[in-house]
Structures are given as C-alpha cells and as structure tokens.
Image (spheres, rainbow, N blue to C red):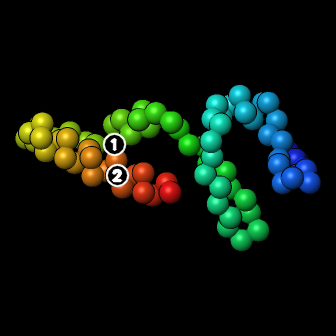
Amino acid sequence: MIVSMDPQGRIYIPAEVRNKIKSKKFKLTVEGDKIILKPIKKKIEKYYSIVRVEKHLTVEKIEEKAKELIIKAVRDEL
C-alpha cells in the first residue's frame, strides 16, 4: 500500500487500515529510513493478564507485582 504525505506533513491512513487498528493515537518511532506507528490503547485492558498468579502469593504481593509490571510496560512504551 502506498500513501502520500501532504505539504503539512499529514499522511492519510486508508479506512480499511483505520477500521482494523481502531486507535486514534500512535507512538511514532523512526528506525533508519522507516517510520513506525504503534497504536496506543487508552484502557488498562492491555495490562490485564500481565501477572502470572502463583497460588502461594498473597493478594498484596500480587498487587505489588502487577503494579511493578504495569509501570515497566508503560515506561517501555514511551
């Protein structure tokens, strides 16, 4: 798929791609001569199931571990 950039630097993303991605915010990175757009999900849903729950852990330990992993995941995205 080929897209163009207008004089203001905007790139049109075709509807078929927008409908598939379902995101309006993206993290933009440049790697060499490549532009990479990664969708940013607004909700905490993407962090669900990030922690493996072990039977011997207390609720407090699970919450502590979840917080650590969520903070790391958010930092890695930025």
Q: Classify mark 1: helix, strand or loop.
A: loop
1 or 2: tag closer to the N-terminus? 1
Dot 1 alpha-carbon crowd within 10 angstroms: few under 14, some 14 to 19, many 20 or more: some
On screen, residue 58 versus residue 21, left or right, reads left
Compared to residue 53, the image places residue 65 above or below, namely below
Compared to residue 2, the image places residue 29 above or below, namely below
On screen, residue 12 versus residue 76, left or right, reads right
CA distance separating discs 1 and 2: 11 Å
Q: Picture coordinates of residue 75 (x, y %)? A: 42, 57
For this rendering, which residue is in front, 41 or 1? 41
Which mark's residue is nearer the viewer, 1 or 2? 2
Q: Picture coordinates of residue 39 (x, y %)? A: 60, 43
Q: Amino acid at mark 1?
A: Ile
Q: Which residue matches tag 2?
A: 71
Q: Picture coordinates of residue 44 (x, y %)? A: 41, 35
Residue at the spot 87% in from the left edge and 53% down from the top edge: 8
Q: Which residue matches tag 1?
A: 50
Asked whether disc 1 touches disc 2, contact meaning CB atoms under 8 Å apart, the reply is: no
Pick the quarter of the image with the N terminus. Answer: top right
